Image: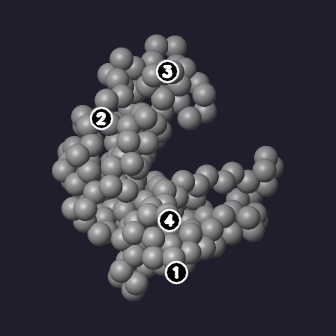
Amino acid sequence: GVEGIVHLILYSAPPGTKEEDEAAYWLVYLKGLWNVLEAARRHQIKRVVHLGSCQTVHPKGIFFTSEVRRPDSSLYAVCKRLQEEMCRQFFEGYGLSTIVLRPDYIVDSRLGMDRRREKLGLGGTRMKNGWVCRHDLAQACRLALETDKVDFDVLHVVGTPEAEKTCNVGRTREILGLEFKGNLEQYR
């Protein structure tokens, strides 16, 4: 009876452990996604929404479309890029309908804290291009499950107005009908 899967994952190596030496890092990010996509394919799930990650502004000034891959090379970045490619391959090879969402820096505009639970705004973390409120990201996940406009896409989910000029957040609005409601301006 499952029609869709939202795949959200984060793994951090234990303190003092290099991520490169932590086998679980690779297993969680890559083998874990493989298992989800393979299960979705076998059980004919209609849609997978995968939460990826990417910068809002490309270091070389290139506009981030769905075809422009993240250029950084940390282990986390490489795993996120490989996850995106895995999603693309399952779509191209098996027709598994998949939308990859690319948030940049997730914050909670309602509680006024960043992902490290530090205060936003004056006396805390100042707003930067690339922020998205977690409530808007949750809405994007729901809308990505429901849309019938595409069978595969890679979409930036960024709530700052500047993002329109550097990444495909305009396409995200168009495809998903997403309206960003997180009040990020209060932290500028």
Do the CB atoms of the residues marked 1 and 4 lie less than 8 Å apart? no
Residue 130 occupies quadrant = top left
Amino acid on which disc 4 is placed: Gly
User: 26 left or right of 113?
Assistant: right
Which is in the foreground here, disc 3 or disc 4? 4
Of residue 102 and residue 163, the one placed in the foreground of this image is 102
Q: Is residue 12 visible?
A: yes
Label 4: state its secondary structure. loop
Name of the residue lying farthest toward the top: 122
Distance (Cα) linking label 3 and label 4 = 38 Å
Q: Nearer the observer, disc 1 or disc 3?
A: 1
The answer to whether residue 136 is above or below residue 8 is above
Q: Earlier in the sequence, mark 2 or mark 4?
A: 4
Q: Residue at x 79, y 55 (%)?
A: 17
Task: Name the residue that disc number 2 marks.
Answer: 180
Q: In the rendering, at what x and y percent does residue 87 appear?
A: 44, 72
Going 38% across and 32% down the picture, which residue do you hit? Answer: 128
Task: Using residue 31 as the reference point, say whether residue 96 is left or right of it.
Answer: left
Asked if the residue under mark 3 is in contact with the one under mark 2, i.e. CB atoms within 8 Å, the reply is no
Up/down of 33 relative to 114, above or below: below
Which of discs 2 and 4 lies nearer the camera? The answer is 4
Name the residue that disc number 3 marks: 112
Give, as a three-letter code, the residue at label 2: Phe
Seen at 78% across and 50% down, the residue is 14
The residue under the point 34% across, 23% down is 183
Residue type at mark 3: give it: Gly
The answer to which of marks 1 and 2 sits earlier in the sequence is 1
Task: Examine the rendered structure and indicate whether residue 153 appears above or below residue 176.
Answer: below
Q: Which residue is mark 4?
A: 1
Q: Earlier in the sequence, mark 3 or mark 4?
A: 4
